[in-house]
Image (spheres, grey):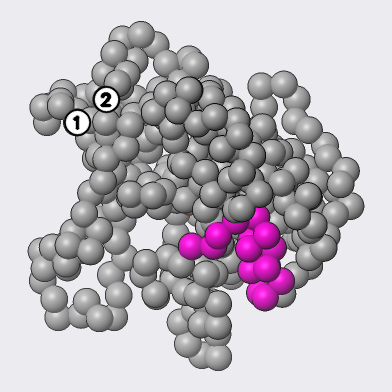
Amino acid sequence: MKVQRPPEESIGAEVLDFDVKLVTPAEAIAIKELVYEHKLVIFKNQSVTEKQYLEFAQKIGTPHIYPQDNYHHPDYPEIFVSSNILKDGKKFGVRGTGRYWHTDCAFLDEPLPFTILYPQILPKSNRETYYLNMERVYEKLPAHLKIYVEGKYIKHDAKWRYKVQECDIDKAIIDIIHDFEKRFPAVQHPAIITHPVTQKKSLYMSSGFTAGIIGLDYETNQKILQELFSFMERDEFIHKHKWNDGDLILWENRTLNHKASIPVLSEESLNYRICVYDGLPFYVSSPSSVDSQAITGAFASA
Ligand SMILES: [Fe+2]
């Protein structure tokens, strides 16, 4: 496996001359280690079917089935479909997903550590995904903001991102929201999370899903959240990936926020995503709470 590592303080390793269809168990472990180290791994020049894509994900970890079936690929529910095209004259997946800063499924009790993205049709222009390095954000976070997040919990809520479906026709908006809240109640996670392998800390929040810092009143929350979002969304923390045909990307949601670019309306796009659990806790509460033996065991079983 030929790896091109990023310059110091940058993210994203490129894997060249490698076919994800042929990944061995030892290579799967090496790939995960690359992700933990570089946050983002790009496999160049891939050509895989849906089945082979899923098989690759299964070698990396346990694929997750997104809890809303309107996103599912009809034959492979593990594949989340983001598209603006029709398939056999029918709606295929959901259009316009993820155009705001977020981490995948932060609104679940067990957020998804890894995302694997494999575009099928790239738009001609605006074919980018943006990443925020949240480990770096934590390192640089000024003291006057750190005091609001250190030792605190954050509320993550997905309801404002819900996309209305055909089954919602004739329902009042308030009922749609209440139904969604019943299915996906807001969850809490620590504002600062410790990585189970590197033991490094990241700020775990996003302007897409973060609804508040627990313990702060409404006015303070509004003010501090805006300050935190403006700080973390600065250019210095943003990494841009410009997609080429054949790119397949694996990234870590523990340390990165991401958002999609907005394609030109007339241009077709079709994207496949699989999120996987890597067999490790999403975060550990303190550096000593996961020992190295437990991590090795989890690598072997994921
Ligand atoms: Fe996403």
* Figure label count: 2
Occupied quadrant, residue 3: top right
In the image, residue 267 sits, relative to residue 34, either above or below, namely below
- The structure residue drawn at horizontal position 42% and vertical position 24%, both measured from the top left corner, is 286
Q: Residue drawn 61% across and 34% down?
A: 293
Q: Is residue 181 left or right of residue 280?
A: left
The picture places residue 245, in percent across and down from the top left corner, at 75, 60
- Front residue of 82/36: it is 36
Answer left or right for 170 relative to 80.
left
Q: What's the amino acid at mark 1?
A: Ile
Q: Residue at the spot x=64%, y=68% of the render?
A: 54
Residue 54 vertical placement versus 133 (above, below)? below
- Report the span colored magenta: 50-64
Q: Earlier in the sequence, mark 2 or mark 1?
A: 2
Q: Amino acid at mark 2?
A: Lys
Q: Residues within 10 Å of mark 2 (few under 14, many from 20)?
A: some
The local secondary structure at tag 2 comes to loop
Residue 161 as seen in the image, left or right of residue 173: right
Residues at marks 2 and 1 touching, judged by CB atoms closer than 8 Å: yes
Residue 269 in view of the camera: no
95 over 233 or under it: above or below: below
Please tell me in which quadrant of the rendered image residue 193 appears: top left
The magenta stretch spans residue 60:
yes
Checking the image for residue 152, the label placed there is 2
Q: Which residue is mark 1?
A: 214
Tell me which residue sits at (42%, 16%) in the image: 141
- Quarter assignment of residue 130: top right
In the image, is 262 to the left or to the right of 246? left
Instruction: Please tell me which residue lies in front, 116 or 65.
Output: 65
